[in-house]
Structure formats: C-alpha cells, structure tokens
Image: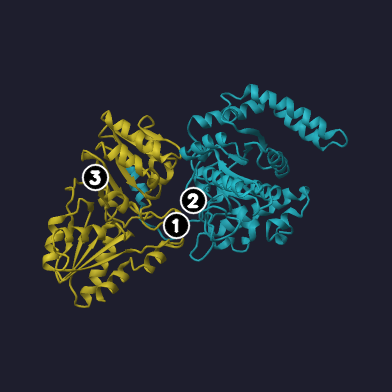
Amino acid sequence: MERDPKIIALTAAMPDGTGIDKVLERYPERAFDVGIAEQHCVTFAAGMSTEGLKPVCAIYSTFLQRAFDQLVHDVCLQDLNVKFCMDRAGIVGGDGPTHHGLLDIAYLRGVPNMVAMAPKDEGEMRDMMLTMLEHEGPAAMRYPRGSGTGADISREPQLLEIGKAELLRDGGEVAVVAYGSMVHPALAAAEHLAKDGVEATVVNARFVKPLDAGLLLALARTKRLIVTVEEAYLAGGFGSAVMELLEENGLLDRVRVVRMGVPDRIITHGDPKLLLAKYGLDADGIYTRVRE
Amino acid sequence: MNLLQKINAPADLRRLSPEDLPDVAGEIRQYILETMSRVGGHTGASLGAVELAVALHYAFDTPRDRLVWDVGHQAYAHKILTGRREQLPTIKQYGGLSGFLRRDESEFDTFGAGHASTSLSAALGMAIARDQKGEDHHVVALIGDSSLAGGMAMEAVNQAGHLKTRLVVVLNDNEMSIAPAVGALTGYLNRIREAHGYHRFKDEVGDLLHDAPLFGERLYQAAKTVKDAIAAAVLPGALVNELGFKYIGYVDGHNPRALVRALEEAKQIKDGPVIVHALTQKGKGFPSREKNYYAWHATGPFDLQTGAAIKASKPAPPQYTAVFGDTL
C-alpha cells in the first residue's frame, strides 16, 4: 500500500482475523471495516474499482461464500479489478463445519475472468500478493489458517507468471501435483518415497485457474500416474480441473489420475492435523496413496 | 455449583424462583470462565449472554417455544442449561461439543448456526410454519447488534414488519462484533442508549414501583406509559417502530429478573413482531476485560486471575494472517 496509493484494504468485521487491523492503523483512509456485510463488501469494492482503485477484499473462504453473486454479477461479469484474499481456506479446526473453507476452489473456478491461486508457503504468498495486484482483473488467493512453514519472508516479493506451475522435483513415473497447502506435504512424501527407491515428480500447481496446461499435458503423456492433492472438497476442485483438462485433450485414458482431497461429506470440528490425517491429506497419507 | 448441579434441562431452571436466577447466572459464568481458562473457546461472546440464556429459558417454554440463536458462538450458557453442562470441557475438540449450534446435537438447538445474521429469517420461517399448522408457541430470535446490521437480517426485518406474525426478537446489544461494531445502525443504537440515559431513572423507579405491594402493578404501568411516550418522542428515526416492530427496552442484559419481566411483556404482544433491546457487555466477568477485545473474543487457555493467555511453549513460524497484513 506504501508503493501503490490505489490499493484499498477491506474487511467484513474481521480486522484482527484477516490482518487488516494493521492496515487500518497505518492507512485509516485507505482501509475499511464494513461490518458483517460480505455482500456489500464485494460490491463496494467493485464500485471502487470502476474508478481505478485496487480494492483487496480480505474475507475468509467460508465467508466469501456469502457474497457469491456479488463476486459473479458485480465483479467478474464486468471484469473488474478486485482482489480476494481468502484466509482460513481449508480445514480450520475447532470452529468446524460452518467455518471450514472447503468450497472456494469449486465456487471460483467456474466463473469467467477469475484468476485463482494458492501459495505453497508464506513466502510465496507475498509473491502472489504482488502478482495479483499487478494483474488487471479479478483474482483470488487462498491460504490456510495458522502458522506458515517458516519460509523466507524477508526477500523482495517476485512477480509470478499467471497460470505457470513450479516443478519442484522431477523424475520417475509418478507425478504428484499439489495445490497450495498440500505442496510441502507432497514434497515430504516424495522424499519418503525416494528412500524406498520410488522416484516421484512434484509440482507446485500455484494456479487452479488458469491451469498450467503445457506442464500438465506433458505429464499426462510421460507419466503412468498423476496424483492431485488439495485441501478442499474434491467435487469441482483442483483435481477435477486437472481431469477436465485431460478430458478436453483426449488424454484421460493415457494416464491414471488419482485425486486426493476432502470427500463429499460434512467435516466435523477438531484438531486440523488430526482431521487432515483422517483424509490422507498429509505427507504420510500422500506417501501411502502413491504406494498403493 | 449448588443450583447448577440440579439443572439438567430448562424445565429444572423453571422450577426455581426468580430470586435464584442471579445465582444461577453467577454459577454459569464461573463455570464458563473456569472451563475456558483450561480448554479455550469463544469466551467473550458467551460471557456476555449468560443472563440472556438464563432469562430466555426461564421465560419461555423451551423446546416447545423455539429459541433461535444468531451465530451461535455466544450460546455456551444455553448449552450448559440444556443438558450439555458436563460436556462443556470437550467443546470444539474432535468428538466433543460443537462450538456453535447444531440441530443434531440437541433438540434445543432449533437452527444450526455459525455465520452471522441468519436468525431472523429462520425464526420468521418457523413463525409462519407455526401459524400455518395452527400452533401457538412462541418463536424467539436472539441477535447481536452487529449481526442485525447484516444484510440478511435487514431483509428479514423488512418482511417481519409486513407479515405481522408473532415473533420475539431479542437484541443483544454489546456494541461489538469481533471488533467494535461499525456503521450507521451502531450510531442509531447508541442514540437509543443516550436517549434512555436521559430517563433511565424512570426504569429504576418503575422497578421499585413494580416490586411494591398493592398498587405496584398499576403504578408500574403508568410509569411505563410515560416512558414509552418519551421513548417514541426521543428515538431518532424510530427504525423499529416505523418498520412495524413493537419495542421493549432497554433492559439491563445482565439482570436476569429484569430480562424475564421484559420477555414476559413481549410474550403478551400478539399482533406482530417485537424487539426486546438488552444492553450487555461482551466478555462480562473476564479478568482484564478492557485491555484487548480481540484477546477475549475467542481465547485459548488463560490465567483465571489476570486473563493473560497461556502461550504454547514451542515457538511457531509467523501465521499466514500476520504475513498477509504486514506485506499489504
């Protein structure tokens, strides 16, 4: 916000929960707490963007559900320059079913003009913030509740190429393509597999929309198995997007695809580690699934 | 926990005399504080709604009368009073009580909640269903001032005033969401507070008269009429009145007997929706309440004497939220 006076920060009654409290303190004229009013927040942002401002809506994944039509009708249909930063994406823990952020991939990726991304750690989150703000048009980023991975946050944020994945590890007949919070567990699983003598390629997908079609289609042509991993509902999620891409390119029978994510049921409250493990969404779970 | 031990359902509470209610509330508050200091939870919101929960279950015949809580994280006292006292220490943990409301957890949880501003729409639906089925129970929604400012709640207010069905709305006015409440409606509610400050003594006179023998009730009614006239004259915009709501208030939201009286009054209103305006303090009874409202909205374990958080011993990398805020 220091670099670009056009950036505006918005929260819907969650200044502390979203980190906007610091911005409200430092830039009281450029930050707004609109109250418990997510729908208004999004259309309020859309109005600002028509006048050339760059509003950033910091809204939890579960609460952005409440403003879906505003996101479609007021932002994406008009291709307006509004950014969505979705904290608490994934399993949130003790707050349970009403607060898990498991639907955002599905509800965002069907909307034209939207760019949707998820960082592998807090360092890459900074890169994505810069990337979103430099991009002209609607963009959304999801990131989980709680601590980062300890990544370097002192370096200058880097501009990322929209729709470009990151190849983290190359080799073998298996490719694990992970989205956001599942990238580090996928890497750990690959290391475990390597100890067993099984090489695996690991991809940090970065974007679910647009997908890195070039890389994914190349994997489909060269690997025996693609495992997609995401901390979200499988229906309409990242793995679904990958399968759609393969289907559109006639590659579904070339390669076996296994999707890992959250199944079609209500997820209870509890320790996130325990819940993620229950659905195989950790290094052990990914390792076991690939071995199978 | 002399009284609380014997309350396994609201029917047990209703067998007590009104004089016992402050003690029940005190025991509940202490139990919430002690439990939350060990396991953590939505401490602040629930501490603010202890007397409301007691009064609502005392004045209304739950679960026959339907009680709908907005958001649900302020409902720990409700959980304690509805047969879940012993399970409170398991709240928000895997296999334990939900931190919010769930229809599959208790018949007293009439409507699942977690997000804000849904209670009035759900309660209005229940009220219309009651009318269509020819039943006569009460439907009561409890909503905070910040949730009332949510769009959906405003949409429900609009239709409730139009439908004119019987509906009791209890406004839990603590001037807070998780953060201090914002917006014009907050300003409006503040003006109501100020207007009432002007003739607050009349409430107290009213209370005294009400408790006096013989002529008490009639004098109380007379004082009420004066009070209503002043309220109607002073309330700016008269949002609720103009939208077809009757208004009862304000009431000290930490005085269970005053709350029960206001709710009994609300039960008499047959021809449309009524708002009972209760003033509460979020985090009531939390040690060092004034210091940091975020600290006691949802807490981890804390020191019962000082309210200070008991930190995990292992240092963790910074949270995504903090990195986001700093980077922005």
Residue type at the position of mark 1: Pro
Confirm or deny contact between disc 3 and disc 1 (CB under 8 A): no
Please tell me in which quadrant of the rendered image residue B229 appears: top right
- Please report the residue visible at 80 percent of the width from the left and 34 percent of the height from the top: B208
Quadrant the N terminus of chain B occupies: bottom right
- Please report the residue visible at 25 percent of the width from the left and 33 percent of the height from the top: A4
Quadrant the C terminus of chain B occupies: top left
Confirm or deny contact between disc 2 and disc 1 (CB under 8 A): yes
Rendered location of residue A265, percent (x, y): 40, 63
Q: Please state which of residues A182 and A158 is positioned toward the viewer in this rendering.
A: A182
Dot label at residue A97: 1
A257 is higher (above) or lower (below) than B250: below
Local crowd size for mark 3, using a 10 Å CA cut-off: few (<14), some (14–19), many (≥20): few
Q: How many marks?
A: 3
Q: Say what secondary structure mark 1 lies in.
A: helix
Q: Please state which of residues B1 and B279 is positioned toward the viewer in this rendering.
A: B279
In the figure, is residue A89 to the left or right of B200?
left
Rendered location of residue B12, percent (x, y): 72, 58
Q: Is residue A5 visible?
A: no
The subunit letter for the residue under badge 2 reads B
Q: Colour of chain A?
A: yellow
* Residue bearing the label numbered 3: A112
Q: Say what secondary structure mark 2 lies in.
A: loop
Q: Colour of chain B?
A: cyan
Real-space Cα distance between discs 2 and 3? 30 Å
Instruction: Determine if marks 2 and 3 fall on one subunit.
Output: no
* Residue bearing the label numbered 2: B114
Confirm or deny contact between disc 2 and disc 3 (CB under 8 A): no
Rendered location of residue B253, percent (x, y): 65, 41
Residue type at the position of mark 3: Pro
